[in-house]
Image (cartoon, grey):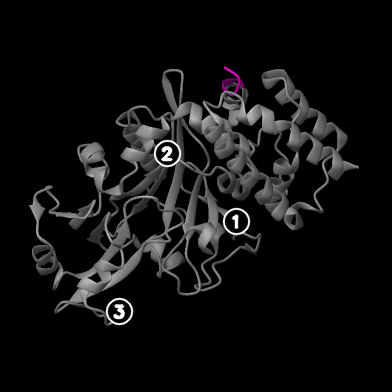
Amino acid sequence: MKKRENYIILRRYVRFFTRGAMNVINSLYLVKIFAGEVYNIIHKRNLYKDVELSDQQKRSIHHLWQKNLGLKIPVLWHRLYQSYTGKFNKNYFPEIFVTMKLEPKLNDREIGNIISDKSLLPLFYRDVEGVRLPETYIMNNSGIFYTPDREIITRDEALERLADIGGCVVKATLDTSSGDSIRLCNFKDGKDRKSGRPIEEVLNSYGENFIVQEKIVPHHKLTELYPGSVNTFRVITYLLEDRIEHGPVTLSMGREGHHVDNIQAGGISIAVSDDGKLYKEGFTHYKEVHQAHPDTGAVFGEYHLPKVRDIIAVTKKMHEKTPHMKIISWDVTLDENNDIVLLEFNVNGMTVWFPQMVSGRSVFGDDTEKMIRMLKE
């Protein structure tokens, strides 16, 4: 009966989520996104099937959403998020409402597609005090090679610049997610020593729209946790009225020799307090629980990371420099000199599920009611 009730509610939401679509094509696109979100939550049912909410807990969720949106929502997302830490929170914000309604409302999607190009980050943030960007060696936009100062160069000139650059990172600048385009290289004598491939062959595998940058050496506190990846802080900032707020901070780490740290790509994510204290437990995508890193043995609860308040402050500064975007996910790290480094940001297709799951806190905290009301304004 409970399953049937949840699925009936989900079907009713098709109309809500496609309301306001400009045309049939847009409606079909929204239905596709909706179907994907529903598939994701049902696909993960084994993670939350044993989580039962009390009648009082369900009433508190329904009251919150009916009061502010006039709709009764499924509690599947609340059960999923609770399944990780065991913490009930009526203010958990279901991913489907962010993807389908809140993000498109707060962020201009067309402008977001443009400014999400990773090669454009210096244009927005190079003058923000307290943060630096990785040094760029060359970049490619729509098949054209550029220097870091955006002077056009030939392919041969680009190859010459990279011939003996040493350790570096090559990554696509458009349409990327979960670190799936990032490649660590070591260019020497015109070849990548890691793969043995000529540099030109490495670049050709990206086609166009990519960037080659310095390989960041992380802060020693981060390498103590896991030395195989950069290890990044995720900070979600959002503009509400005339102020910028932030959600729960998380740290993602690689494992098992992998250089990618994203939780979606097999990494471990753990919540971090605003003053830098790691929570006691970190989690993988499919709810493996770790109190210590499985590769290094570093005990999470014993770590206090530096400059987390500075990281929060600088992401808010950068948000102020980002026009037309009212919610942004930032990925930053600390380098060996204790400098804050901006790696990338997301304004389209961002996720709010894992900061909530690993922290047991709502992404919007005390602002949850205001964010729910935005869905109908």
The residue furthest right is: 1
Q: Secondary structure at mark 2?
A: loop
Q: Quadrant of the C terminus?
A: top right
Q: Which residues are magenta?
A: 373-377
**Badge 1: residue crowd in 10 Å (few <14, some 14–19, many ≥20):** some
Closer to the observer: label 2 or label 1? 2
- Is residue 121 part of the magenta span, yes or no? no
Looking at the picture, which amino acid does disc 3 mark? Lys
Disc 2 residue type? Val
Q: Which mark is residue 347?
A: 2
* Left or right: where 51 falls relative to 223: right
Where does label 3 land, which residue?
194
SS assignment at label 1? strand
Question: Of the numbered discs in the image, which one, if any, rests on residue 199?
Answer: none
Q: Is residue 374 magenta?
A: yes
Q: Which residue is mark 1?
A: 280
Tell which circle, 3 or 2, labels the residue nearer the N-terminal end.
3
Q: Which quarter of the image is occupied by the N terminus?
A: top right
